[in-house]
Image (cartoon, grey):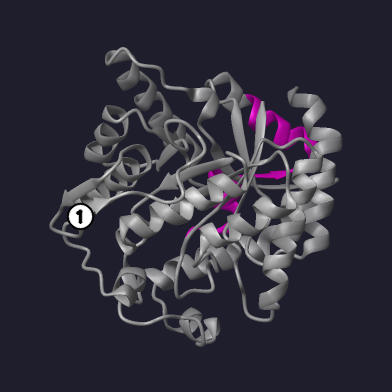
Amino acid sequence: MKLALFTHMSWPEGVNQTSVFHNSVEQVKLAESMGYHGAWFAEHHFTRYSMGSSVLLMLGHLAAVTHKIRLGTAVIVPNLHNPIRIAEDAALVDVLSQGRLDVGFGRGTYGYEYGGFGVPTEDSQDRFRDTVLAVRDLWCNKAVSIESPFFSINNADLVPSVLQSPHPPIYIAATRSEETLDFMISNQFLLCIAVVQDTDAALNLVGKYSRLCKERDQSDHLDEVPFFRYVHVAESDQKAQKNTKKHVDWIQDIMQWRRNLPNTTEVYVPMQKWLEERDELPPSDSYISEKRAFIGTPEAVAEKIMMLKDHGISYFGCNFAMGGLPQEEIIKSMKLFEKKVLPLIS
């Protein structure tokens, strides 16, 4: 089974902002030394939930300090960018990394991420498709001209060119939208599974994706589909839960909070204010541990991974750095995963 890291680069109150970036770099370097296949970073804006505002810039830095591990975006939100800018920046990272770039796209979350850029949420599906296809065309063709309701490209030649041929692998974030699933398969893009989906629902989606690919007589490339989960390994289930509860709760709290802020950010507002105002609770840490996270002893985590293997999953992505978990706990979990989980799933 191929392994990957995934991170949001979260910034909870009391956490040093700079350390989040440097710690993320150290985690990727450690993962590469352990033989991980990929490292994926999420794009978000105007929020402590994720500081991935310039995800391709982050990957450009990682290209300089790594040698083998693939570097991925999970995901870029194309609706917030001009396609030329995405295509140029991604091409440069592909060149600097010597062809190690994977590019995932998704529509992201609405609320203030769209509002902060002044991008309307109406027609987001059409804008998404037009932008992704424009990026692909810029990578593959010369003298590209496109007239879209959302942008205009006139006789553009991309410099630099992408190194991978015909272009870096394109991934589309897992979606319940039939329209997006059809768009993905019709263009032979790859699927990626987000940490925010329940495992059962995500597996059902993988099955549906595979069936639709088969119906169209094309490969599903499941060995290239990353299945991301929150992961933490400790000597006992109790220790694992104790280590992660506060951080899992923070993730659910801020995700709920952000959905209720269409016109502003939560960055400089104490979370306690939201906790006192809200009138419903998000999913509990016990729900997340049961439905989305692989948290527990090496044996318990390995059992869940083996269940994924039984469903045809062979590329597993670990979100070790969840919601401000201290670096020493992240490193300890990664090393315990390597020492005790890997032998059980190999």
312 to the left or right of 125: right
- Residue in view at x 50 percent, y 38 percent: 199
- Quadrant of the frame with the C terminus: top right
**x, y (%) of residue 83?**
32, 55
**x, y (%) of residue 302?**
72, 31
> Is residue 110 visible to the viewer in this orientation of the structure?
yes
- Residue in view at x 66 percent, y 30 percent: 2
342 to the left or right of 75: right
**x, y (%) of residue 232?**
72, 49
- Residue in view at x 46 percent, y 65 percent: 44
Q: Residue 310: name its quadrant.
A: top right
Q: What's drawn in magenta, residue-wise?
A: 283-306
Q: Amino acid at mark 1?
A: Asn
Q: Secondary structure at mark 1?
A: strand
The front one of 214 and 266 is 214
Residue of label 1:
154
Residue 292 shown in magenta? yes
> Is residue 236 visible to the viewer in this orientation of the structure?
no
- Quadrant of the frame with the N terminus: top right
Total marks drawn? 1
Q: Residue 207: name its quadrant.
A: top left
Determine crowd level at label 1: few under 14, some 14-19, many 20+ residues with C-alpha closer than 10 A.
Answer: few
- Residue in view at x 37 percent, y 33 percent: 189
Relative to 15, say whether 27 is above or below: above
What kind of secondary structure does the magenta stretch mostly adopt? helix
Q: Residue 229: name its quadrant.
A: top right
273 to the left or right of 293: left
Residue 75 shown in magenta? no
**x, y (%) of residue 52?**
53, 64
81 to the left or right of 10: left
